[in-house]
Amino acid sequence: MQYRNFPMVPRVIFGRGSFNQIQEILTPKRVNTKAPFIFLVDEVFQDNPWLIDRIPLRFLDQIIFVSAEEEPKTSQVDALVEELKSRFTQNPSGIIGIGGGTLLDMAKAVAIMLTNEGSAADYQGWDLVSNEAVYHVGIPTISGTGAEVSRTTVLTGPEKKLGINSDFTPFDQVMLDPELTRGLPQNQWFYTGMDCYIHCIESLTGTYLNAFSQSYGEKALELCRNVFLEKNVRDEDSEDKLMMASWHGGMSIAYSQVGVAHAMSYGLSYLLGTKHGIGNCIVFNHLEEFYPQGVSEFKKMVRKHDIEIPTGICKDLTDKEFDKMIDIALMLVPLWENALGKNWQEIITREKLKNMYKKM
Amino acid sequence: MQYRNFPMVPRVIFGRGSFNQIQEILTPKRVNTKAPFIFLVDEVFQDNPWLIDRIPLRFLDQIIFVSAEEEPKTSQVDALVEELKSRFTQNPSGIIGIGGGTLLDMAKAVAIMLTNEGSAADYQGWDLVSNEAVYHVGIPTISGTGAEVSRTTVLTGPEKKLGINSDFTPFDQVMLDPELTRGLPQNQWFYTGMDCYIHCIESLTGTYLNAFSQSYGEKALELCRNVFLEKNVRDEDSEDKLMMASWHGGMSIAYSQVGVAHAMSYGLSYLLGTKHGIGNCIVFNHLEEFYPQGVSEFKKMVRKHDIEIPTGICKDLTDKEFDKMIDIALMLVPLWENALGKNWQEIITREKLKNMYKKM
């Protein structure tokens, strides 16, 4: 048996208001005055001085607002890298992603592509990156994706939706300030929290499970249950706990894998542009066969928070579209293998997947 | 409020038999053929080919067996550094500690002192180290101390027992192979496991607690309870779980602090040479006042495993000896403050400590 030597985020700061320490953290990392810090910030914060005014801009530093309305694309990464290369004479001192999974993945991908030739699409897969990335920092403002600790950055490319999985992908620094997640719209809070819940279920029931992933996954699940089932208010305590759930959930899948929901949700995202959080919910809602207890508990949480999970989004698709979606989902071999074992192809046929998608 | 930007172990491999991957992990870290890897190994393994034969020695690489009968001393660290400096023309490519907390702490301290002037005793305290340590790897063979993830290396110096707490202290690489903990004598297994249990209780009931530490501490505690209370056998599952308990427990205190048991146990170690694990048990056994539930549960575990906790070890001490022990314990201000708050000195007087020690 060969084990992965897992790269962990080497620096983490946790605490309400810890975002105020951003300057002291970045200053020692400035290469020189011509190498700026580039802050990639979710554009929902554009008119939010509470957050924006605390971003310390010096010399050539720059905030670039990025929409998270759509899942991050390889073309977007390439365009950003192109822009930074043309605008500055040197590579940035650092790329700082501030936002949800989309912004965090974008920051990781841009940091990688600044030091690696070609298009981000060339690196979608496992261990294709050869040069160390530019220093990059992740500051989540939405909890649940686990992108803050993961070894991947999931991108939609011209041919596939797949992560850049590499030892150079994880952030050099993460700032966990639960205060930054306040005021998030209820639906988004729920969908993204469920990303964590769902990947924990996938990790904990998967064939790749080991005691490392299990201990992280169980803790994350417990925190999700507390936030979404036991508690009746969304307060500071929930913000703290959900941020830790996301962290532990990310660690759990980092050392194992996700499963059926993620594989199928990637298909939806690729074809229909469905955002990852809601996409997972749409899929998971129909996965009783694979995750009976998890799906039943998930439905309880949906009811408790009065959340609408869209249905019928696949009903008007053509056969060709179904085929594309199925192609994307089937590409994710480690996910299927984790969920169903080495012989997963005996269980998951194209026909079976099509029938499942049709219900969604 | 100022938060610590915590340095995490940047690489971790987990799995039964993962120790077999030691060569692939070390090879890329070799500086050159004159800069050896130095393996500091607990001397209990001296005649254990199952472990020793798997240590890959190339060029000038060396195994140095170290006794863990006593707590690690600054003088021992200084002597080892002296020896390495005189024997080789270059600093080692890496220091690899294989053993329990003593060996892990020794490896961390030697790695630091190879690049920092003077004696290890000069660096006992908080953030006194200025140069990056030599690459160092921790491979625990006993679970519970949390030394594999901590930001400290606890040493007994001429004047104090105190850690070298610094950002350069944590290992660059940790290998978690639960198989290496098999065959550990029952007492040592219990005492060291209780180190984890006790520091989780101290962390979870402390004033420094936050959601980060809490989530790690709760998981570690749950794993300890499972191993020491719920399960009736010591099997592979216990080995896996206790190794993860130690890891999570270490993470919990890394971001908060330990408390009364650790502070007082340091006093015992300094004066009487009591090993840390058993010292914690001796002290904790008498701390109902501070940790009523934890102590009651601890006593259940002691009974279940039919462990003898020594008593009366302080009964023949002189006043001068008590004074020294109390001096050492009181030096650990953050531990007392965590346990009892800013006004801890109103609760903990020298007289009070003396009376507590007298019972032990």
Image (cartoon, coloured by chain):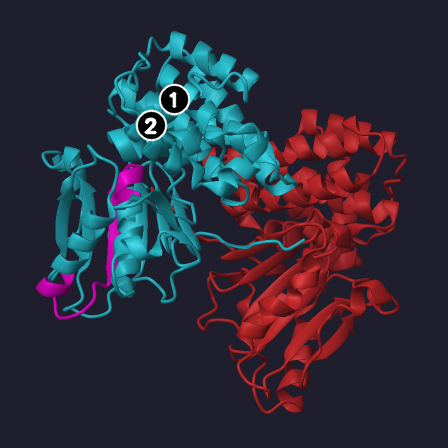
Chain colours: A red, B cyan
Quick one: which residue is furthest to the front in this view? B319
* Label 2, label 1: how far apart the Cα atoms are: 8 Å
The one of B162 and A69 positioned closer to us in this rendering: B162
Disc 1 residue type (three-letter): Tyr
Q: Are marks 2 and 1 in contact (CB under 8 Å)?
A: yes
Chain letter of mark 2 equals B
**Looking at the image, is mark 2 or mark 1 earlier in the sequence?**
2
Asked if residue B119 lies in the magenta stretch, the reply is no
Q: Tell me which segment is drawn in magenta.
A: B84-104
Residue A98: which disc? Answer: none
Disc 1, SS: helix
Q: Position of residue A149 (x, y in %)?
A: 57, 53
Which residue is painted at 59% across and 46% down in the image?
A: A250
Q: Which residue is mark 2?
A: B322
Which residue is painted at 47% across and 71% down in the image?
A: A132
Asked if residue B92 lies in the magenta stretch, the reply is yes
Q: Which residue is mark 1?
A: B357
The one of B166 and B161 positioned closer to us in this rendering: B161
2 or 1: mark nearer the eye: 2
In which quadrant of the rendered view does residue B323 lie?
A: top left
Is B19 drawn above or below residue B192 in the view shown?
Answer: below
Is A179 drawn above or below residue B292 in the view shown?
Answer: below
| Left or right: where B198 falls relative to A22 | left
| Left or right: where B64 falls relative to A283 | left
Tag 2: Cα neighbours inside 10 Å, few (<14), some, or many (≥20)?
Answer: many
Same chain letter for marks 2 and 1: yes
Q: Position of residue B36 (x, y in %)?
A: 17, 62
Disc 2 residue type (three-letter): Phe
